[in-house]
Structure formats: structure tokens, C-alpha cells
């Protein structure tokens, strides 16, 4: 009996969104933008999810709770971010925990994006579409979610306080139009 390593399992498993990108998105982008090579087609590089907890100055346990929920959502342990310098007006001391963030790459990134598009975004109340103006001109797209309960992994009964998050999608494209087209073909629900 042959022992199968974890790495071999990861190589055999291809996320659904990555398969969609390779089979459908790449040919459509090559046709639209007249790329000569598949390697010129923009691709996703990473997804950064950031939770800033302003009330953590008075209650440090809020950061731990937010980190637990972010770990459930992303499947990866978040990094706790700390204050770089003291600000007396906000009662903030240097080195205090004020948030947490996660950087997703490769298979986890595609899995998270698939869950975001298919399950989390449709659960947002009064959702009318994501803004098509949140591009930075260098291939990145930013948007925010007002509460973490839109993800089915988070148990609503155990949530003590709703917490928003900022999601940044980094791509290898050089213009807003390329990034918009890439995300649209991947299934992002933009406003019309």
C-alpha cells in the first residue's frame, strides 16, 4: 500500500474557481484584450482580509474573538496587528492589539473567493451589487463587508458583536478595465 503525502493530495485537488479561470476566463480574456500568450492574462495573486477593532483599546478580548471568527471564515490563522505608535486621543499605547489580518494565496484563495461569491455575498441584506469604482489603477480591488455573519461558517448564536472587514483582491493586471473584466468573468456581482 502506497502512502500518499499531503502535498500530492493538494496537487490533485483543483478548486472549482481555478478550473473556471483556466478553462473559460483565460480564452475570453485573450480574445478580448488580444494577448499573444496565456501568461499575459491577468491572474489573482492574493486576497488580504483585514479586521480593524477600534474598541480593542478598552477590551483586549475582542481581538481574540475576531481572530477566532476570521480563522473560521478563511481556514487560516490570522496575524494580530498591533499599534505602531501611541495616540493619546484614542487611548492607544504602542504595541496594543488593534486588529487582525489574513493573506490568502493559491488554493485557499480560490476556495475563499468561491465561498464569498456563491454563499456570503448573496446573504447580504439589501444587496445591490459591488461598486465598480473601487479599483486602484494598479490591479487591486477593495471592498468592505459590514458584518461577519454573512459567512455560513460563523455561528450567529455565538457572535457577541458584529464586526466588519475589508477585503483586498490583488491581481497581476495593470489597468482597471483588465481587473474589472477578470473579476466579472469569475462571477463578481458588480452594479450596473
Image (tube, helix red, strand yellow):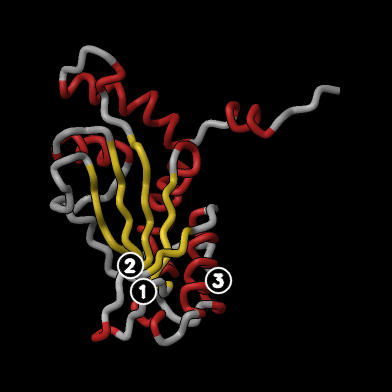
Query: Could you say whether the residue bearing mark 2 is in a helix, strand or loop?
Result: loop
Residue 145 placement (x, y as % from top left): 32, 64
Query: Could you say whether the residue bearing mark 1 is in a helix, strand or loop?
Result: loop
Q: Earlier in the sequence, mark 2 or mark 1?
A: 2
CA separation in Å, label 2 and label 3? 33 Å
Q: How many other residues sit within 10 Å of disc 2, few (<14), some (14-19) or many (≥20)? A: few
Residue 98 placement (x, y as % from top left): 39, 72
CA separation in Å, label 2 and label 1? 6 Å
Q: How many other residues sit within 10 Å of disc 3, few (<14), some (14-19) or many (≥20)? A: few
Of residues 136 and 117, the one nearer the viewer is: 136
Q: Are marks 2 and 1 in contact (CB under 8 Å)?
A: yes
Residue on which the image places disc 3: 155
Of residues 183 and 143, the one nearer the viewer is: 143
Q: Please report the residue visible at 45 percent of the width from the left and 85 percent of the height from the top.
A: 59
Residue on which the image places disc 2: 84
Q: Earlier in the sequence, mark 2 or mark 3?
A: 2
Q: In this view, which residue lies farthest toward the right?
A: 1
The quarter of the rendered structure image containing the N terminus is: top right
Residue 62 placement (x, y as % from top left): 47, 78
CA separation in Å, label 3 and label 1? 33 Å
Q: Please report the residue visible at 54 percent of the width from the left and 56 percent of the height from the top.
A: 77
Relative placement, left or right, of 150 versus 130 is right
Residue on which the image places disc 1: 94
Q: How many other residues sit within 10 Å of disc 1, few (<14), some (14-19) or many (≥20)? A: few
Relative height, residue 28 to residue 119 (above, below): above
Relative placement, left or right, of 23 versus 71 is left
Amino acid at each position: 500500500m502506497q502512502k500518499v503525502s499531503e502535498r500530492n493530495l493538494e496537487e490533485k485537488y483543483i478548486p472549482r474557481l481555478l478550473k473556471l479561470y483556466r478553462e473559460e476566463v483565460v480564452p475570453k480574456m485573450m480574445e478580448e484584450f488580444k494577448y499573444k500568450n496565456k501568461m499575459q492574462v491577468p491572474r489573482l495573486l492574493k486576497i488580504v482580509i483585514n479586521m480593524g477593532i477600534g474598541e480593542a483599546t478598552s477590551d483586549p478580548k475582542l481581538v481574540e474573538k475576531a481572530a477566532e471568527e476570521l480563522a473560521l471564515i478563511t481556514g487560516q490563522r490570522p496575524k494580530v496587528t498591533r499599534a505602531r505608535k501611541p495616540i493619546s486621543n484614542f487611548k492607544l499605547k504602542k504595541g496594543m492589539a488593534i486588529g487582525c489580518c489574513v493573506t490568502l494565496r493559491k488554493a485557499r484563495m480560490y476556495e475563499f473567493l468561491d465561498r464569498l461569491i456563491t454563499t456570503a455575498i448573496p446573504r447580504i441584506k439589501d444587496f445591490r451589487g459591488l461598486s465598480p469604482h473601487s479599483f486602484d489603477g494598479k490591479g487591486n480591488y477593495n471592498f468592505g463587508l459590514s458584518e461577519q455573519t454573512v459567512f455560513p461558517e460563523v455561528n450567529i448564536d455565538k457572535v457577541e458583536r458584529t464586526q466588519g472587514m475589508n477585503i483586498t483582491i490583488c491581481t497581476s493586471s495593470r489597468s482597471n478595465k483588465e481587473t474589472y473584466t477578470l473579476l466579472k468573468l469569475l462571477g463578481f456581482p458588480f452594479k450596473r
